[in-house]
Amino acid sequence: MFDAILIDRAGDGRSHAALTRLERDALPDGDVLVRVGWSTVNYKDALAITGASPVVRSFPMVPGVDFSGIVEASDSPEFAPGDRVVLNGWGVGERHWGGLAGYARVKADWLVPLPGGLSLRRAMAIGTAGYTAMLCVMALERHGLRPGSGPVLVTGAAGGVGSIAVALLAALGHEVHALTGRPEEEAFLRGLGAAEIVAREALSGEGRPLAKERWAGAVDVVGGRVLGNLLSQVRYRGTVAACGLAGGMDLPATVAPFILRGVTLAGVDSVMCPRPDRLEAWTRLADTLDTARLDGLTTECPLGEVIALAPDLLAGKVRGRVVVPLH
Ligand code: NDP
Protein backbone atom coordinates (compact mmCIF):
# COMPACT_ATOMS: atom_id res chain seq x y z
CA MET A 1 0.00 0.00 0.00
CA PHE A 2 1.16 3.58 -0.64
CA ASP A 3 -0.14 7.14 -0.23
CA ALA A 4 -1.57 8.95 -3.25
CA ILE A 5 -3.79 11.81 -4.26
CA LEU A 6 -6.75 10.54 -6.24
CA ILE A 7 -9.15 12.69 -8.28
CA ASP A 8 -12.58 11.23 -8.92
CA ARG A 9 -15.86 12.44 -10.25
CA ALA A 10 -18.77 12.67 -7.83
CA GLY A 11 -22.47 12.28 -8.66
CA ASP A 12 -22.71 16.02 -9.35
CA GLY A 13 -20.25 15.59 -12.26
CA ARG A 14 -17.60 17.68 -10.53
CA SER A 15 -14.18 16.32 -9.73
CA HIS A 16 -12.90 15.97 -6.17
CA ALA A 17 -9.36 15.32 -5.01
CA ALA A 18 -8.56 13.38 -1.84
CA LEU A 19 -5.57 11.85 -0.13
CA THR A 20 -5.91 8.07 -0.13
CA ARG A 21 -4.08 4.73 0.14
CA LEU A 22 -3.69 2.56 -2.95
CA GLU A 23 -2.40 -0.93 -3.67
CA ARG A 24 0.30 -1.48 -6.26
CA ASP A 25 -2.07 -3.80 -8.14
CA ALA A 26 -4.30 -0.80 -8.79
CA LEU A 27 -1.61 0.91 -10.90
CA PRO A 28 -2.25 1.10 -14.65
CA ASP A 29 -0.35 -0.97 -17.24
CA GLY A 30 3.20 -0.04 -18.16
CA ASP A 31 6.56 -1.72 -18.52
CA VAL A 32 8.44 0.06 -15.72
CA LEU A 33 7.46 0.30 -12.05
CA VAL A 34 9.03 3.34 -10.35
CA ARG A 35 9.29 3.98 -6.63
CA VAL A 36 8.60 7.71 -6.68
CA GLY A 37 11.10 9.75 -4.69
CA TRP A 38 9.80 13.26 -5.31
CA SER A 39 7.04 14.95 -7.26
CA THR A 40 6.00 18.59 -7.53
CA VAL A 41 3.03 20.91 -7.83
CA ASN A 42 2.93 22.50 -11.28
CA TYR A 43 0.30 24.93 -12.56
CA LYS A 44 -1.33 22.09 -14.49
CA ASP A 45 -1.44 19.91 -11.36
CA ALA A 46 -3.20 22.73 -9.52
CA LEU A 47 -5.74 22.97 -12.39
CA ALA A 48 -6.33 19.19 -12.17
CA ILE A 49 -6.65 19.11 -8.36
CA THR A 50 -9.01 22.09 -8.14
CA GLY A 51 -10.96 21.08 -11.26
CA ALA A 52 -10.55 24.68 -12.47
CA SER A 53 -9.87 23.44 -16.00
CA PRO A 54 -10.56 20.07 -17.67
CA VAL A 55 -7.00 18.79 -17.41
CA VAL A 56 -7.99 15.29 -16.26
CA ARG A 57 -9.10 13.13 -19.18
CA SER A 58 -10.12 9.95 -17.36
CA PHE A 59 -11.27 9.16 -13.83
CA PRO A 60 -10.16 8.13 -11.27
CA MET A 61 -6.80 9.86 -11.81
CA VAL A 62 -3.61 10.28 -9.81
CA PRO A 63 -2.41 13.83 -10.67
CA GLY A 64 1.22 14.89 -11.00
CA VAL A 65 2.70 15.61 -14.44
CA ASP A 66 6.21 14.81 -13.25
CA PHE A 67 8.23 12.74 -10.81
CA SER A 68 11.72 11.49 -10.09
CA GLY A 69 12.37 8.08 -8.64
CA ILE A 70 14.12 4.74 -8.71
CA VAL A 71 13.16 1.86 -10.98
CA GLU A 72 11.85 -1.00 -8.90
CA ALA A 73 10.92 -3.44 -11.70
CA SER A 74 11.30 -3.27 -15.46
CA ASP A 75 10.16 -5.31 -18.48
CA SER A 76 12.16 -2.98 -20.73
CA PRO A 77 15.79 -3.62 -21.73
CA GLU A 78 16.37 0.13 -21.40
CA PHE A 79 15.91 0.27 -17.63
CA ALA A 80 16.96 -1.95 -14.74
CA PRO A 81 16.05 -1.95 -11.04
CA GLY A 82 18.01 0.75 -9.24
CA ASP A 83 18.14 3.17 -12.21
CA ARG A 84 17.41 6.81 -11.33
CA VAL A 85 14.80 8.30 -13.66
CA VAL A 86 12.74 11.41 -14.27
CA LEU A 87 9.42 11.77 -16.10
CA ASN A 88 7.75 14.88 -17.54
CA GLY A 89 4.47 15.02 -19.40
CA TRP A 90 3.32 12.46 -21.99
CA GLY A 91 -0.17 12.86 -20.53
CA VAL A 92 0.90 11.54 -17.14
CA GLY A 93 -1.36 13.08 -14.50
CA GLU A 94 -3.92 13.76 -17.26
CA ARG A 95 -4.63 10.46 -19.04
CA HIS A 96 -2.28 8.12 -17.18
CA TRP A 97 -1.74 7.98 -13.40
CA GLY A 98 0.92 10.45 -12.35
CA GLY A 99 3.56 11.36 -9.80
CA LEU A 100 1.66 12.45 -6.69
CA ALA A 101 1.80 8.89 -5.35
CA GLY A 102 4.32 6.53 -3.79
CA TYR A 103 4.57 4.42 -6.95
CA ALA A 104 3.98 4.88 -10.68
CA ARG A 105 3.86 2.36 -13.51
CA VAL A 106 4.66 3.91 -16.90
CA LYS A 107 6.01 3.27 -20.39
CA ALA A 108 9.79 3.02 -20.64
CA ASP A 109 9.74 5.49 -23.57
CA TRP A 110 8.49 8.21 -21.23
CA LEU A 111 11.40 7.98 -18.82
CA VAL A 112 14.64 9.93 -19.00
CA PRO A 113 17.73 8.67 -17.12
CA LEU A 114 18.63 11.26 -14.51
CA PRO A 115 21.89 13.06 -15.36
CA GLY A 116 24.67 11.99 -12.97
CA GLY A 117 25.07 14.96 -10.67
CA LEU A 118 21.40 15.63 -9.92
CA SER A 119 19.72 14.35 -6.76
CA LEU A 120 16.13 13.11 -7.00
CA ARG A 121 15.01 16.15 -4.99
CA ARG A 122 16.82 18.68 -7.18
CA ALA A 123 15.50 16.94 -10.30
CA MET A 124 12.01 17.77 -9.09
CA ALA A 125 12.99 21.24 -7.91
CA ILE A 126 13.63 21.67 -11.63
CA GLY A 127 10.64 19.51 -12.61
CA THR A 128 8.43 20.20 -15.60
CA ALA A 129 8.67 23.94 -14.92
CA GLY A 130 12.46 23.96 -15.19
CA TYR A 131 12.57 21.57 -18.10
CA THR A 132 10.06 23.83 -19.91
CA ALA A 133 12.17 26.87 -19.06
CA MET A 134 15.16 25.13 -20.67
CA LEU A 135 13.10 24.27 -23.77
CA CYS A 136 12.23 27.98 -23.99
CA VAL A 137 15.91 28.95 -23.75
CA MET A 138 16.74 26.39 -26.45
CA ALA A 139 14.01 27.88 -28.68
CA LEU A 140 15.46 31.38 -28.23
CA GLU A 141 18.95 30.08 -29.05
CA ARG A 142 17.66 28.27 -32.16
CA HIS A 143 16.47 31.67 -33.38
CA GLY A 144 19.81 33.32 -32.78
CA LEU A 145 19.75 34.67 -29.22
CA ARG A 146 23.24 34.79 -27.73
CA PRO A 147 24.66 36.41 -24.57
CA GLY A 148 25.20 40.03 -25.54
CA SER A 149 22.22 40.11 -27.94
CA GLY A 150 20.42 42.38 -25.48
CA PRO A 151 18.13 42.12 -22.47
CA VAL A 152 15.83 39.08 -22.21
CA LEU A 153 12.48 39.43 -20.44
CA VAL A 154 10.94 36.66 -18.34
CA THR A 155 7.25 37.05 -17.45
CA GLY A 156 5.60 35.45 -14.41
CA ALA A 157 9.12 35.59 -13.08
CA ALA A 158 8.43 34.66 -9.45
CA GLY A 159 6.52 31.50 -10.45
CA GLY A 160 7.91 28.05 -11.24
CA VAL A 161 8.82 28.31 -14.93
CA GLY A 162 9.70 31.99 -14.56
CA SER A 163 12.09 31.68 -11.63
CA ILE A 164 14.07 28.89 -13.25
CA ALA A 165 14.11 30.76 -16.58
CA VAL A 166 15.59 33.78 -14.77
CA ALA A 167 18.27 31.64 -13.09
CA LEU A 168 19.10 29.78 -16.31
CA LEU A 169 19.35 32.84 -18.55
CA ALA A 170 21.47 34.67 -15.96
CA ALA A 171 23.77 31.65 -15.63
CA LEU A 172 24.16 31.60 -19.42
CA GLY A 173 25.34 35.22 -19.38
CA HIS A 174 22.19 37.07 -20.46
CA GLU A 175 20.96 40.35 -19.02
CA VAL A 176 17.66 39.24 -17.52
CA HIS A 177 14.66 41.49 -16.94
CA ALA A 178 12.01 39.95 -14.68
CA LEU A 179 8.34 40.89 -15.04
CA THR A 180 6.35 40.27 -11.87
CA GLY A 181 3.09 41.26 -10.24
CA ARG A 182 4.77 40.87 -6.85
CA PRO A 183 7.14 43.79 -6.15
CA GLU A 184 7.90 42.20 -2.76
CA GLU A 185 9.78 39.47 -4.65
CA GLU A 186 12.38 41.88 -6.03
CA ALA A 187 15.17 40.64 -3.71
CA PHE A 188 14.31 37.02 -4.55
CA LEU A 189 14.46 37.73 -8.30
CA ARG A 190 17.71 39.69 -8.05
CA GLY A 191 19.13 36.79 -6.06
CA LEU A 192 18.34 34.52 -9.01
CA GLY A 193 20.26 36.84 -11.31
CA ALA A 194 17.68 39.37 -12.57
CA ALA A 195 19.31 42.68 -13.51
CA GLU A 196 16.05 44.63 -13.73
CA ILE A 197 12.53 44.25 -12.34
CA VAL A 198 9.56 45.21 -14.56
CA ALA A 199 6.13 45.73 -12.96
CA ARG A 200 3.37 43.57 -14.43
CA GLU A 201 1.22 46.68 -14.93
CA ALA A 202 3.76 48.01 -17.43
CA LEU A 203 2.56 45.35 -19.91
CA SER A 204 -1.05 44.92 -18.74
CA GLY A 205 -2.72 47.93 -20.33
CA GLU A 206 -4.03 48.41 -23.83
CA GLY A 207 -0.91 48.64 -25.97
CA ARG A 208 0.04 49.90 -29.40
CA PRO A 209 0.87 47.64 -32.38
CA LEU A 210 4.50 48.74 -32.14
CA ALA A 211 6.25 50.38 -29.20
CA LYS A 212 9.86 51.24 -28.37
CA GLU A 213 12.17 48.24 -28.97
CA ARG A 214 13.38 46.87 -25.64
CA TRP A 215 14.05 43.14 -25.47
CA ALA A 216 16.17 40.89 -27.68
CA GLY A 217 14.14 37.91 -26.49
CA ALA A 218 11.58 36.79 -23.95
CA VAL A 219 10.24 33.76 -22.14
CA ASP A 220 6.50 34.19 -21.63
CA VAL A 221 4.41 32.11 -19.22
CA VAL A 222 1.54 34.61 -18.96
CA GLY A 223 -0.05 34.92 -22.42
CA GLY A 224 -2.98 37.33 -22.89
CA ARG A 225 -2.39 41.04 -22.97
CA VAL A 226 1.08 40.77 -21.45
CA LEU A 227 2.23 38.66 -24.40
CA GLY A 228 0.57 41.00 -26.89
CA ASN A 229 2.26 44.05 -25.39
CA LEU A 230 5.57 42.27 -25.05
CA LEU A 231 5.59 41.39 -28.76
CA SER A 232 5.23 45.07 -29.62
CA GLN A 233 8.44 45.85 -27.68
CA VAL A 234 10.71 43.09 -28.97
CA ARG A 235 13.78 44.27 -30.84
CA TYR A 236 14.28 43.77 -34.56
CA ARG A 237 14.55 39.99 -35.31
CA GLY A 238 14.07 39.09 -31.65
CA THR A 239 12.21 35.99 -30.44
CA VAL A 240 9.59 35.25 -27.81
CA ALA A 241 9.24 31.70 -26.50
CA ALA A 242 5.60 31.33 -25.40
CA CYS A 243 4.75 28.44 -23.08
CA GLY A 244 2.01 29.52 -20.70
CA LEU A 245 -1.40 31.04 -20.07
CA ALA A 246 -1.24 32.09 -16.40
CA GLY A 247 -2.70 35.47 -17.42
CA GLY A 248 -5.05 34.28 -20.16
CA MET A 249 -5.56 32.11 -23.20
CA ASP A 250 -6.20 34.97 -25.62
CA LEU A 251 -3.62 36.92 -27.59
CA PRO A 252 -4.59 40.51 -28.33
CA ALA A 253 -1.86 41.49 -30.79
CA THR A 254 -1.29 42.67 -34.35
CA VAL A 255 0.95 41.30 -37.08
CA ALA A 256 3.06 44.47 -37.00
CA PRO A 257 5.97 43.04 -34.93
CA PHE A 258 6.21 40.04 -37.27
CA ILE A 259 6.06 41.83 -40.60
CA LEU A 260 7.88 45.06 -39.70
CA ARG A 261 10.49 43.83 -37.21
CA GLY A 262 10.88 40.18 -38.22
CA VAL A 263 9.96 39.09 -34.70
CA THR A 264 9.49 35.36 -34.10
CA LEU A 265 6.88 33.89 -31.78
CA ALA A 266 8.14 30.40 -30.91
CA GLY A 267 5.68 28.03 -29.25
CA VAL A 268 7.01 25.66 -26.61
CA ASP A 269 5.31 22.44 -25.55
CA SER A 270 6.87 20.17 -22.95
CA VAL A 271 4.27 17.38 -22.92
CA MET A 272 4.84 15.70 -26.29
CA CYS A 273 8.34 17.11 -26.84
CA PRO A 274 10.52 14.53 -28.68
CA ARG A 275 13.05 12.54 -26.67
CA PRO A 276 16.28 14.06 -28.11
CA ASP A 277 15.21 17.55 -27.00
CA ARG A 278 14.31 16.19 -23.54
CA LEU A 279 17.71 14.56 -23.15
CA GLU A 280 19.45 17.75 -24.25
CA ALA A 281 17.32 19.88 -21.92
CA TRP A 282 18.02 17.69 -18.87
CA THR A 283 21.74 17.49 -19.59
CA ARG A 284 21.97 21.25 -19.96
CA LEU A 285 19.89 21.85 -16.82
CA ALA A 286 22.24 19.65 -14.81
CA ASP A 287 25.27 21.47 -16.26
CA THR A 288 23.95 25.04 -16.08
CA LEU A 289 21.82 25.56 -12.98
CA ASP A 290 23.55 26.77 -9.87
CA THR A 291 22.47 24.38 -7.09
CA ALA A 292 22.46 27.09 -4.40
CA ARG A 293 20.09 29.20 -6.52
CA LEU A 294 17.95 26.15 -7.26
CA ASP A 295 17.72 25.26 -3.56
CA GLY A 296 16.88 28.89 -2.81
CA LEU A 297 13.79 28.86 -5.02
CA THR A 298 12.52 25.49 -3.73
CA THR A 299 10.10 24.82 -0.90
CA GLU A 300 8.76 21.50 0.33
CA CYS A 301 5.10 20.54 0.75
CA PRO A 302 3.97 17.24 2.32
CA LEU A 303 1.60 15.17 0.16
CA GLY A 304 -1.18 15.73 2.72
CA GLU A 305 -1.03 19.51 2.13
CA VAL A 306 -0.90 19.56 -1.68
CA ILE A 307 -4.69 19.79 -2.14
CA ALA A 308 -4.83 22.89 0.07
CA LEU A 309 -1.88 24.49 -1.77
CA ALA A 310 -3.38 24.15 -5.28
CA PRO A 311 -5.73 27.21 -5.17
CA ASP A 312 -2.88 29.40 -3.88
CA LEU A 313 -0.70 28.34 -6.78
CA LEU A 314 -3.42 29.22 -9.31
CA ALA A 315 -3.80 32.61 -7.59
CA GLY A 316 -0.10 33.32 -8.25
CA LYS A 317 0.73 33.33 -4.52
CA VAL A 318 3.37 30.59 -4.57
CA ARG A 319 7.00 31.53 -5.10
CA GLY A 320 9.38 29.40 -7.17
CA ARG A 321 9.09 25.62 -7.07
CA VAL A 322 7.29 23.32 -4.67
CA VAL A 323 8.59 19.77 -4.24
CA VAL A 324 6.66 16.91 -2.64
CA PRO A 325 8.50 14.06 -0.87
CA LEU A 326 7.01 10.62 -1.56
CA HIS A 327 9.71 8.29 -0.18
P1 NDP B 1 3.20 29.26 -11.40
O1 NDP B 1 1.84 29.42 -10.81
O2 NDP B 1 4.30 28.74 -10.54
O3 NDP B 1 3.69 30.65 -12.01
C1 NDP B 1 2.88 31.47 -12.79
C2 NDP B 1 3.25 32.92 -12.53
O4 NDP B 1 2.57 33.74 -13.48
C3 NDP B 1 2.83 33.45 -11.18
O5 NDP B 1 3.74 33.12 -10.16
C4 NDP B 1 2.77 34.94 -11.44
O6 NDP B 1 4.11 35.45 -11.43
C5 NDP B 1 2.26 35.00 -12.89
N1 NDP B 1 0.81 35.20 -12.95
C6 NDP B 1 -0.15 34.49 -12.30
N2 NDP B 1 -1.38 34.95 -12.60
C7 NDP B 1 -1.18 35.99 -13.46
C8 NDP B 1 -2.06 36.89 -14.13
N3 NDP B 1 -3.39 36.82 -13.97
N4 NDP B 1 -1.52 37.81 -14.94
C9 NDP B 1 -0.18 37.90 -15.12
N5 NDP B 1 0.70 37.08 -14.49
C10 NDP B 1 0.20 36.14 -13.69
O7 NDP B 1 3.00 28.33 -12.68
P2 NDP B 1 4.12 27.54 -13.54
O8 NDP B 1 5.35 28.33 -13.56
O9 NDP B 1 4.14 26.13 -13.12
O10 NDP B 1 3.44 27.60 -14.99
C11 NDP B 1 3.35 28.85 -15.66
C12 NDP B 1 2.55 28.71 -16.94
O11 NDP B 1 3.30 27.89 -17.85
C13 NDP B 1 1.19 28.05 -16.77
O12 NDP B 1 0.27 28.65 -17.62
C14 NDP B 1 1.46 26.62 -17.20
O13 NDP B 1 0.30 25.99 -17.66
C15 NDP B 1 2.47 26.82 -18.30
N6 NDP B 1 3.31 25.66 -18.56
C16 NDP B 1 3.35 25.21 -19.85
C17 NDP B 1 4.11 24.15 -20.19
C18 NDP B 1 4.18 23.74 -21.61
O14 NDP B 1 4.55 22.60 -21.89
N7 NDP B 1 3.85 24.60 -22.54
C19 NDP B 1 4.86 23.40 -19.17
C20 NDP B 1 4.83 23.99 -17.84
C21 NDP B 1 4.04 25.10 -17.56
P3 NDP B 1 4.46 36.88 -10.79
O15 NDP B 1 3.82 36.91 -9.44
O16 NDP B 1 5.94 36.92 -10.75
O17 NDP B 1 3.88 37.91 -11.72
Image (cartoon, rainbow, N blue to C red):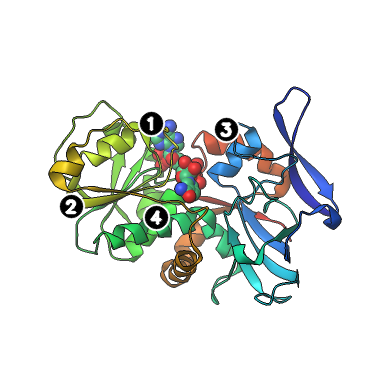
What whole-number distance in Å separates the C-alpha atoms at marks 1 and 2?
Answer: 23 Å
- Say which residue label 2 marks: 237
Q: Residue at x 16, y 42 (%)?
A: 259
Residue 274 sits above or below residue 198 on the image: below
**Left or right: 308 with respect to 319?**
right
- Say which residue label 4 marks: 165
- Say which residue label 1 marks: 250
What whole-number distance in Å separates the C-alpha atoms at marks 2 and 3?
Answer: 35 Å
Q: Residue at x 75, y 41 (%)?
A: 60
Residue nearest the observer in this picture, 39 or 108: 108
Q: Earlier in the sequence, mark 3 or mark 4?
A: 3
Find residue 270 and report its horizontal and vertical position in percent. 48, 54
- Say which residue label 3 marks: 53
Disc 2 Cβ-to-ligand 1 distance below 8 Å: no
Give, as a three-letter code, the residue at label 1: Asp
Find residue 200 and report its horizontal and vertical position in percent. 33, 35
Q: Quadrant of residue 280?
A: bottom left
What whole-number distance in Å separates the C-alpha atoms at marks 3 and 4?
Answer: 25 Å
**Left or right: 263 with respect to 282?**
left
Q: Earlier in the sequence, mark 4 or mark 2?
A: 4
Q: Say which quadrant the N terminus sits in.
A: bottom right
